[in-house]
C-alpha cells in the first residue's frame, strides 16, 4: 500500500469538526476566500500527504476551503519564502519541517527569509521517526548489523539516498555511517518520490528516510526496515527494532512538521487556525490513520511549536557543521 493510500484511505469517515468561526475572525480571514496551504516539497512525499489530510479536515472546521499548493525547491526554502512574504491575513500559510525551521539557516550561506523573524508558528502538526530501509531484492541483509558488516566489505563503499542535501534524511545517515565506520557516498534526491524508485532499482544501497514515506512498502514486503530512529518500536511494525536495539545507542531522531504564517498575522487568526489544527490532531480516528501511515498527529500551541524549533537549533547546527554539508 502506498503512503498516499495508507494515509488517505477512509479519512472521509472521520467526522468533521464543528466550525470555529466568529464574525470578527471570519472578517480577519477575508470571509470565505480559500486559504492557501503552501507545501514546499513535491507531491507524494510525507509532508504533502499529511498536509492534505489536515487541509481537508481544516476546511470543514473553518468553513472555508484550505487548498494545498506545492512549491518545491531549495530544500523547502522556495515555498516557505512565498509564505514569509505573503500578506499577514491568514489566507497564506505553510507546512514546514524541522529542516526548514531548525536546519536550513545553518546549511545555506544566504537565506531568502529569516526563519525566526519572518514566520510565526501556528502549531505542531505531526512527527515521524526515520527508518533504515533497503530493497530485499537488491541486498541480502536482514538486520542493521548484517548491513554494516556487508558495507564494510565493499572496497569502494556504499551509496545512500536522501531527500536532499542537509535534510534530516541526509544528516542522520551521515551520523550513522560516521559512527559505524562505513565508507558511504551520499546521493541526494528531490524527495521521497525519487528516493523510493532509486532504492527499488538498486541505484542506491540504503536510505535513512521518514517512516511515513516507506511504511506501506515495508508492509508489502517491497522494502525491508532494519531499524527505526524513535525511542520505541513503531506500533504497527513491532518486528523492526529501534536503533539502540540494533546496536546503535543514543540515536533517537524524530522528524516533525508544523504550520506557519507570515510574521505580523494577528493573534486571533493564529488562534483560530491553531484551533482547527488541534481538532484534527485530537480526533481519535485521525490519530489511528496517522499511526497506520507512519506518523503521529501532534497537538500544540503556537508557543510550543516555536519552543521546539528553538530547542533543536543548537543540536542541528552542530550536526551540520560536523557533516560539512552545504547547500549553496
Image (tube, rainbow, N blue to C red):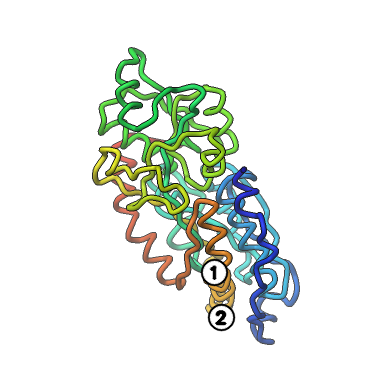
Residue topped by disc 1: 284
Relative image position of residue 306 (x, y in whole percent): 41, 65
**Residue at 47% from the left image edge and 27% from the top image edge:** 187
Relative image position of residue 177 (x, y in whole percent): 31, 31
**Residue at 63% from the left image edge and 48% from the top image edge:** 4
Image marks 2 and 1: residues in contact by CB distance under 8 Å: no
In depth, the one of 21 and 52 nearer the eye is: 52
- Above or below for 260 versus 81: below
- Above or below for 144 versus 288: above
In depth, the one of 279 and 236 nearer the eye is: 236
Could you tell me how far apart the alpha carbons at marks 2 and 1 are, in whole angstroms?
A: 27 Å
Judge whether residue 257 can be spotted in this image: yes
Q: Residue furthest bottom?
A: 23
In depth, the one of 52 and 317 nearer the eye is: 52
Judge whether residue 328 can be spotted in this image: no
Q: Residue furthest top?
A: 155
Residue topped by disc 2: 268
**Residue at 75% from the left image edge and 70% from the top image edge:** 33
Q: Earlier in the sequence, mark 2 or mark 1?
A: 2
Write down the quadrant of residue 309 in the picture: bottom left
Amino acid at each position: 500500500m502506498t503512503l498516499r493510500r495508507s494515509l488517505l484511505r477512509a479519512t472521509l469517515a472521520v467526522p468533521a469538526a464543528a466550525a470555529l468561526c466568529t464574525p470578527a475572525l471570519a472578517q480577519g480571514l477575508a470571509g470565505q476566500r480559500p486559504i492557501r496551504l503552501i507545501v514546499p516539497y513535491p507531491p507524494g512525499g510525507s509532508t504533502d500527504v499529511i498536509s492534505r489530510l489536515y487541509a481537508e479536515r481544516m476546511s470543514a472546521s473553518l468553513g472555508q476551503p484550505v487548498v494545498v499548493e506545492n512549491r518545491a525547491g531549495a530544500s523547502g526554502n522556495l515555498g516557505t519564502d512565498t509564505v514569509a512574504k505573503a500578506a499577514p491575513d491568514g489566507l497564506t500559510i505553510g507546512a514546514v519541517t524541522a529542516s526548514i525551521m531548525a536546519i536550513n539557516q545553518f546549511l545555506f550561506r544566504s537565506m531568502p527569509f529569516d526563519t525566526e523573524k519572518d514566520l510565526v508558528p501556528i502549531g505542531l502538526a505531526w512527527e515521524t521517526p526515520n527508518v533504515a530501509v533497503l530493497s530485499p531484492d537488491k541486498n541480502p541483509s536482514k538486520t542493521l548489523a548484517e548491513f554494516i558488516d556487508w558495507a564494510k566489505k565493499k572496497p569502494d563503499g556504499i551509496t545512500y539516498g536522501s531527500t536532499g542535501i542537509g535534510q534530516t534524511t541526509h544528516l542522520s545517515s551521515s551520523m550513522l555511517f560516521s559512527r559505524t565506520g562505513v565508507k558511504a557516498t551520499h546521493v541526494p534526491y528531490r524527495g521521497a518520490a525519487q528516493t523510493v524508485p532509486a532504492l527499488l532499482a538498486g541505484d542506491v544501497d540504503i536510505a535513512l528516510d521518514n517512516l511515513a514515506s516507506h511504511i506501506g512498502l515495508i508492509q508489502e514486503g517491497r522494502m525491508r526496515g532494519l531499524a527505526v530512529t524513535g525511542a520505541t518500536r513503531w506500533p504497527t511494525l513491532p518486528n523492526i527494532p529501534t536503533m539502540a536495539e540494533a546496536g546503535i545507542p543514543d540515536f533517537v531522531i524524530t522528524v516533525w512538521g508544523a504550520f506557519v504564517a507570515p510574521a505580523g498575522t494577528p493573534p486571533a487568526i493564529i488562534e483560530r487556525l491553531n484551533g482547527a489544527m488541534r481538532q484534527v490532531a485530537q480526533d481519535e480516528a485521525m490519530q489511528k490513520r496517522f499511526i497506520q501511515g507512519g506518523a503521529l498527529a501532534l497537538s500544540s500551541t503556537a508557543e510550543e511549536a516555536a519552543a521546539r524549533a528553538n530547542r533543536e537549533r543548537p543540536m542541528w547546527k552542530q550536526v551540520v557543521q560536523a557533516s560539512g554539508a552545504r547547500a549553496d
